[in-house]
Each structure stands twice: as structure tokens, then as C-alpha cells.
Amino acid sequence: MTSSGVLMVLLFFKHVTADNSGTVVTSCEACHDQATCLDSPVERERGDAFQTGSVTCTCQDGFVGDGITCYDLEFCAKGFCCCQGYGWSSELGCVDVDECSLPDQPCSPPQVCENTPGSFNCLVPHEDDLHSSPGSDSRSVQFQCGGRRCPVGEDCISVGGTSLCADPCLHYSVLNDDWRSTTNYGPANGYHCDSSVNWQGWYRLFLGNTSVQMPERCVEKYMCGTEIPLWLPLAHPQLLDGVVQRSVCGHYYYDCCYWRQNPIHVKACYGNYYVYKFVPTTTCNMAYCADVNTTVCSTCGVFDACVSDNETNWRCERKAPELVCGRSLLKVGLPNVYLEAAGLDASSAHLADHRCSAHEDRNGTVWYQVERREGRCGNTLETNATHAVFSNSLFVYPVDGRNDSRPFGFPFSCVYPLETESSLDVAIRPLPLTDHKVVRVGAKAKASMSLYRDTNYTQPYPAGQPVTLIAGSSLYVGVSVEESEAERFVVVLEDCYTTESPSPDNLPQTYMIQDRCPTNRTQVTVEESGSSLRARFSALLQGDYRYIFLHCSLSLCDQRSSSCTPVCSRRRSRSVSKSIRLKPLTIGPITWAQSLE
């Protein structure tokens, strides 16, 4: 093997097998000169406009191989037959040499050697592969060039007649054969073959003047201007994956991957295109396909991704910046690689209020943050009956100047449920948001309820422990909710009642407050409700109980859009608002005694 790069072999996987029973091919033209072609009339395809039989290539006596390639046993024993990366075997022919098992390792630590047919890959170890995209199963391939290890994402490429480490996204050849289209029917328009092409370096696929990519789906036989169309069974790599290896499948008979070609190298490039390092196909007629359905990808912007749900229909979709919705801060992160590719200046960015431009560069991402309050740096706040939505926009300007250039805008929103940790009994109805806006859901508000010793509501009983009261004494109950928008939201007591078990759903239920109002004004007094993020009431309980549990259901109310103060008459009519009904909070058990002695 040479050190100028990872070599891709020109031979087919079946070269490593000693099976001389022959190989099924499309026509006798695929057989080696020293092979016998057997055209069997059996297993002919039905319903196909282009009928074919079962054609088998078998090496003649004195030769060994799979019928597509046959080796002269006497001549090859002298060491003249095998390509680089293969060794001679009198029984098997040319077999792959596993470079990774040799004493002299071809890859430099900490790289991981991966053997491939006739070659090898030097992979970046998982723990060091900081370039691969999160969630990606691709491993970056690293190349050697003149004894030097190339950076991840570069290959040893001839530039101006000199071999050097370079980015293949910037150094490629255009491959614009219209006959490669997935809609081109070979039998009608003629067959083409990639077995004799002298592939050199990297290629970018075009159909006409439009950049396209290889299909990621099974292509029908005889399409792409050939008999056996070649496609990728795995998805293309992501931008941060660098150069990866991908297997190639060929559709023949009724098997989408009947032919498994030698793998190729692929890299994703900024601007929504890919480059490929092709190798000659094993035989004719095989050819690499260009997916006509991916022409839409050329219209995607630098901050768009070309995505598909079925590998057939593609669309442009805005790449979402990182967004963190905290209890007190909203944080937006833009990767440096995207900013550089788009020609945007991270230091020029600001929020809706141009005075808010502070940022921090951390681990390859530029972060901007704003306090989670209405009006801060242009924050807007909208509410409905179930959610509060904080929204803003980040504007970034091109590097060539901010005054005369139009900024690139990133709208974002954080949605916060108007409920406590235990509240899940309301339908989720977020406000409608603008298309392409980055949206994340923030943490729910926290609520707590305590039983106090007296009317001052300053000395609570220990939480989580049973409470014993003298028979006939009053309960002093306080509720509080953690919410940063204290001027906007208030907590309302909806219903408070007792049961004889910890479950708020068990019967019987004895109400003290119902529909926001006391059930008995002589025994229940609401001290505070609907005016702040605190609520308080006292109740005198009478009856013969062994123990009781107290439950209160609450609501958060936006006092700018609703009437939050309960209006109670003798008939306990309930005021109407858009506040949220929450699941009950519970304290207990509470037991009664004649005295505390």
C-alpha cells in the first residue's frame, strides 16, 4: 500500500472465494476471456419489457476465479497478477491482504485501522472523533499524504501537480452525465458502464446545471442508463462527519442489493451538496446513479438542510440553532462552522434590541442569552389558557459590513406550560408560531402547599410528616408558585377539599373552597387568592375523623388578559377567566386529638 492515501480496490468482493461454480451476470459480455458462458433458459423474468435469462460465467480449466475475473494458475504463481492490496493464492486466486493484522501497522495511533477489500481505512477513534455529528454512526476517515496525517475532512489530492492535504469540497471534478438520471431507461436510450472509467480524485454530480446526489433508495433495474443501477443503502454523511466510507448496492433480479460493489468515500459540503470518490465498477453494465428528485436541494440556503422522509421526495428545511429554555435565561447557540460557511460575523449579532449583543464562544458554538422577562432585549410574551410563550430574534450580519448589509434573522421561542410539576389535566394548546421559528419547551412552574401553625402564616409544620391538631382548631394553609413573571401571573385557589385517603379522587370529598369561593363563609376565610403568586386561607373543620388529607387545585392566571380575582356571592357564582385548572396539591395526614399532651 502507498502512503498517499487510502486506496480503493478495483476488484469485486467475490474474488476472495474459491467457488468456481460461476457467477450470475447480465450477459456473456461480462465473462472473462478464459471463462465459459452458460445461458440457461430457466428463471426468466416475467412481465419485464426486457427479458433476460440466467447467464453464468465459469472459469475454464487451468484458471481460477469467479468467471468475471479468471487467473492463469501458472502465470500468476510468478506474482504478476494481483493488484496492490491483494495476495496470490493457488486455490482462491487474488485474495485481500488484511493490512490491519500486519506487524507494521499502517495507521498512526490513536487512529483505528479498518480493513477493506484491497485496502484499509484509518478511522478517528470514537472518543476523539469530535467532528462527527451528534447521533451519527459515521466514522471519520483520515488519510496520509507524504508521511503526514491529513486533518479530518481532507484527502491527499493533487493540486497543481503536487500532492497535498486538501478539502475535496473545494477540489473536485464535475460529473454531469445526463444519462445517469434515475428516470433514464437504459433499454430505450442505450447502456452505459463505469467499469472502464479512469476515476481520478473526487466528483460532484450534476444533471444539467443543477447539483444532485446519489439516491438513497433502491433504483429500478435498467434505470440510470444501465442494466444494474448503483445506489447508497445508507444515508449520506452529515456536515461534521468529514470523509466517510459508504457501501454501494446494485439492483439485479429481484434483489435491490444483489451486487455489492467496493465501497466509495463520501463527504458532505457546505451549500447542500456532496462529493464522491468513485472507483471502477466490477463489470458492465453497472453505473452510478444521479437522483433527479434531489434537484430541489440546490435551492436550499446555507442554513437549510435538504431532508426527506422517504428518500424519494426532498425538501429544504431550516436548520435549527441550539436553543435552551431555562427558568431564568433563554440561550441561543450558532455553530461557528455554519457562521463561517454563510460568511456571517458572530461579533455583529444582536437580539431584537440592538444593544443586546453580548456573546460567548464555547466549544465551537457562539452563545447569546437573554433574561426570561417580558421586554428584556426585545422579548415579547404571549399567553393563552395553557402556555406562556417568550419570543425574540437574533440578527447576524455578513462579514463585509453591518450597516449596508441585510442581516440574517433567527426567530426563536420558548414555551412554558402554565402549570405545576403535578399538573397534567389540561389540554396542551400552544400559541400558533411563525414558520421557521425555533421553538423549545421550558420547565414547568413549581408549586408548593404548606400547613401553618397560626394566622401569621410564618411557621409551617414540617413537610411530609403527619400533623396532629386539637379538635375544633383551624387549618391555616398557604400556597406559593415559582414564576419569574411575578407582575404578569397570579395563582388562584380553584377547589380545596378533604378526603380520608391520600388520593384526591377518592370519595367522599368535603369541600372548603369550590369554584374559587368558600362553601361556608362562617368556617372558611380566603385571605389571598388571585392577587400574587401566593394564596392563603383558613378553615375550621368539624366532624368525627380519624385523619384527613387536604387537597387544593390551583390555576395560574394572566392578569393582563383575564379577570383573576374571584367574585363570590352567596350563591358562589364563579368568575370567568382563561386561567389553568391544575391537579390538586396534597398535604396530610392530619389527625385530631382532644389535647396535645
Image (tube, rainbow, N blue to C red):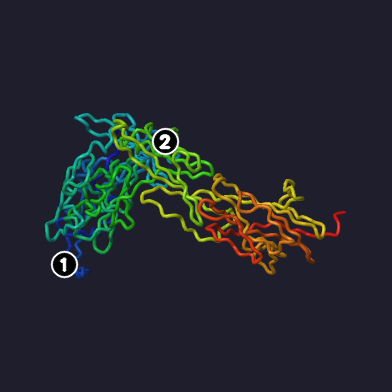
- List x then y, in percent, for residue 298: 24, 47
- List x then y, in percent, for residue 546: 79, 64
Q: How many residues crowd around disc 2 within 10 Å: few (fewer than 14), some, or many (20 or more)?
A: some
Kindly indicate the quadrant of the structure image that contains residue 501. bottom right
- List x then y, in percent, for residue 419: 56, 54
Measured along the vertical axis of the image, is residue 218 above or below residue 341?
below
Image position of 376 (left or right of 456):
left
Sequence-wise first label, 1 or 2: 1
Residue extending farthest right: 597
Residue under the image location 30 percent in, 41 percent down: 270
Measured along the vertical axis of the image, is residue 163 above or below residue 532?
above
Between 326 and 23, the one lying in front of the other is: 326
Q: How many residues crowd around disc 1 within 10 Å: few (fewer than 14), some, or many (20 or more)?
A: few
Name the residue beneath numbered marker 1. Answer: 49
| Quadrant for the N terminus in the image | top left
- List x then y, in percent, for residue 404: 28, 33
Image position of 272 (left or right of 384):
left
Measured along the vertical axis of the image, is residue 140 above or below residue 25?
above
Measured along the vertical axis of the image, is residue 115 above or below residue 467?
above
Q: Amino acid at mark 2?
A: Val
Q: Amino acid at mark 1?
A: Ala
Name the residue beneath numbered marker 2. Answer: 366
Q: Secondary structure at mark 1?
A: loop
Is label 1 in contact with label 2 (beta carbons under 8 Å)? no
| Quadrant for the C terminus in the image | bottom right
Residue 212 visible somewhere in the drawing: yes
